Amino acid sequence: MIPELGLIFLIISTVSALILSFIPLYASYSKNSYLFSYVKPLTALMTVSISTSILCLLISFLVDDFSVAYVANHSNTQLATLYKVAAVWGSHEGSMLFWVVSIAIWGCLIVFSSRYQDPLFVGRMIAILAFVIAGFNLFMLFTSNPFARLLPNFPIEGRDLNPILQDIGLIFHPPMLFLGYVGLTITFAAAIAALLGGKFTQQHASYLRPWVLMAWVFLTGGNAFGSWWAYNELGWGGWWFWDPVENASFIPWLVATALLHSVVLSQHRSSFKVTTLLLCLLAFSLSLLGTFLVRSGIVQSVHAFASDPTRGMSILSLLGVFVCGALTLFALKGNLIKSKSDFSLISRDSFILLGNIVLVVAAISVLLGTFYPLLFELLNLGTLSVGAPYFNSMFVPLTFVAVLLMGAAPLIKWQKQSLKPLKPLLYLLATAVAIGIIVALQTRDGFNPWVFIGATAAAWVILTLGYLVFSLRQQGTAIIAKKVAMMIAHLGVAVTIIGATAVSNFESQELLRMGPGQGKEVAGYTFVYEDTVDVETNSYTAIQANIRVMDSDENDIGYITPQRQTFKTNAMETTQAGIMRNLVRDLYVSSGQQLSETEYLVRISHKPLACWIWIGGLMMMFGGSIAAFSGLYSLRRTQAASQTVQHRVNTDKALQAKELA
Amino acid sequence: MSKTYTSTLVRLLAGLAILLCISMSAQAASDKIHYTPDQIRDLGFEIAHELRCPMSVNQNLFDSGAPIASELKGQIFLMLEQGESKAEIIDFLVQRYGEKIRYQPSFSAATALLWFGPILLLLGIVGVAAALIREQRKHQDTNGNTYE
């Protein structure tokens, strides 16, 4: 009964979304303001029904209704309740539903908020959102219905949630990523609404900015948690693999980063409006392309969803409809959007513009590297792999340029900057380069260019931020929330760069055969393999190695316990690395295949500053959140101010009327 | 381009490549490198990071736990101990397992776009942006700064 209800609500929301996607457009076309009064109730109907639908799916999971195929395939009675909840978005069908529900709720909040004082713009926007929702819903109904039943012979016990996904990472990583994609959907709808109206004012940009920021914060979180999960759970020792599926979520992040800076230009300086709109369209299209890559099964990856060619075709046609429609509209109406461009070459405007170009080029080169093997095979040129060495050699130099611009931009004036006051910047740059050279000389093989790039970039950001704080205080300017947000996020980038550079270039590792009683010294720490024990939990059995760790003074500092887990439900084997962390280093041990009766292939790594990678990610998220909330707050304030003015005008009018009477 | 012409070209190129290989291996045979144990470990890890495991999904040889990966890692260390260079070892494995094993695709006409695409794109976008801005500014100067 519950799953049928879920399906019916899904259909109701599809129908209301279809209606909603025409009404505001027709109303604005025919100048019929009465029709506009339908927008709010229809939005509410769509949102409530789709939310009820996902609630039905959740209930089916919680009561172990294995007659629902999706539940039977991804849950069983033994699964912990938390993972049952997470399983709702743990695979293809449910995650689509989650995505649509989030779009609907976010759109609903916008429609019912009093912040947005342009009903025509909001009306057009919700029409586009409803169109996207209708598209996704039809896709679900026709090819991937989450409520499909296994009747009459339904299983008594379900299968298991993919065991490597049973981790705290799964609870955060996918929903954050989807919310990021949802944010990009919102900005896409806003861009289309602006194009339909033929204007994109500074007010529209101030609406757009918090949405872009929130989308960016979620995408940052999604990527950071994803890499955290891969680091802990896959047992391969790395934190970023340039895997096609990782790239699929990283490319939209890069474009969203460019978008978020472009929107600042549009709001603050009324410039680069067309660029902002184009980036909105690009970011959304790339997130859909990523979805296609992940769900169609055209690439091999451990992260990929179960593949199905019909799904791939449907996503591709959705992508075609949205992107072609959007680009056609852009071609027709783009020329109506007028921007100012009154800045000189040395100005904050031009630095941000250049930085954005570099970010977009970085995104496109990652895209190129990800799709090249596919195209190569499609054109019958043979097979090849594009992996980490290629991506690093493209991405690191581009990031370096972007970071140089990022450090300088906040210190340069808008519009036009005379060269003379920039002298301190040159000193700072020289200092950063000197630091870079000194650090790069610390590596084993003399001068390491990668270390030089990383260290110089990080030093440059930190120095310029310090100088910014110093000069702001000297001028006695109040440091506003938005500035603080920017500083925290930029500092986060520096912290991540430090972590990544340290781990990639100063890691010490050993790969060796180890059994009870044997020891090995790595980077001053001694690792002693004490014994192998069997461990059993609800969902898996594991062979666990107990490895004692001593520091350079032979003091015990604890045990590291890597496991080889075998899941009971599907006999799948996974590696759980053992990690001992602190702020300056991670000690990482993973246990591989069995080599003899007592010996295993063991991998021991000393990873300096590893956790800085994710601390930097958290700082970026924190900075982004402050900026988003301060944007929302100032929107509310201007709206309140305009209401007070309105109120005063009204009372004045009333008084005048009285006087006249 | 006619088929015979292409095949002649391919044959010519292949011949050249073989000649190059022979001359390189002859040169290498004359001066084998002698590595210290530390160098062998670092270089071996480096090579293992740049090659794809033939068996597991999207993992490099170093990370992969598949039996074939261990075997190939052993092979790499063996060849290093015999004094072979990094390029020789990678060439040997590419010959055995095909171009797909290499995570860093070699440079050729077919991969030129991959290697030069990003830089060309960067120059292209910067050029177009500069031209657009100049155009816009010219427009503004004649009409005054009255755009919103």
Image (cartoon, rainbow, N blue to C red):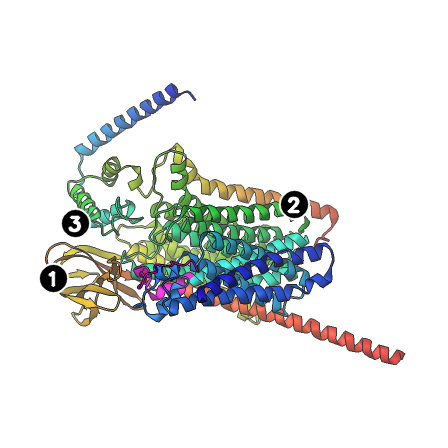
Seen from the viewer's position, the closer of residues B143 and A624 is: A624
Q: State the quadrant of the N terminus of chain A.
A: bottom left
Specify the farthest residue to the right.
A661
- The percent position of residue A43, horizontal first and vertical second, equals 60, 64
- Please report whichever mark, 1 or 2, sits nearer to the chain's N-terminal start: 2
Rounded to the nearest angstrom, the CA distance separating label 1 from label 2 is 72 Å
Three-letter amino acid code of the residue under disc 1: Gln
* Residue that numbered label 2 is attached to: A332
Q: Which of the two marks, 1 or 2, is nearer to us in this view?
A: 2
The label on residue B37 is 3
Q: Describe residue B63's horizontal placement relative to residue A521 as left or right.
A: right
Mark 1 Cα within 10 Å, few/some/many (few <14, many 20+)?
Answer: some
Please give the name of the residue rendered at 89% of the width and 78% of the height, measured from the top-left corner. A660
- The percent position of residue A238, horizontal first and vertical second, equals 30, 56
Secondary structure, mark 1, is loop
Rounded to the nearest angstrom, the CA distance separating label 2 from label 3 is 66 Å
Three-letter amino acid code of the residue under disc 2: Leu
**Chain letter of disc 2?**
A
**Chain letter of disc 1?**
A
Seen from the viewer's position, the closer of residues A392 and A200 is: A200
Seen from the viewer's position, the closer of residues B86 and A122 is: A122
Is residue A106 among what the camera can see? no
Secondary structure, mark 2, is helix
Rounded to the nearest angstrom, the CA distance separating label 1 from label 3 is 20 Å
* Residue that numbered label 1 is attached to: A518
**Label 1 with label 2: CB-CB less than 8 Å:** no
Secondary structure, mark 3, is helix
Region in magenta: A147-174
**Chain letter of disc 3?**
B
Q: Which of the two marks, 2 or 3, is nearer to us in this view?
A: 2
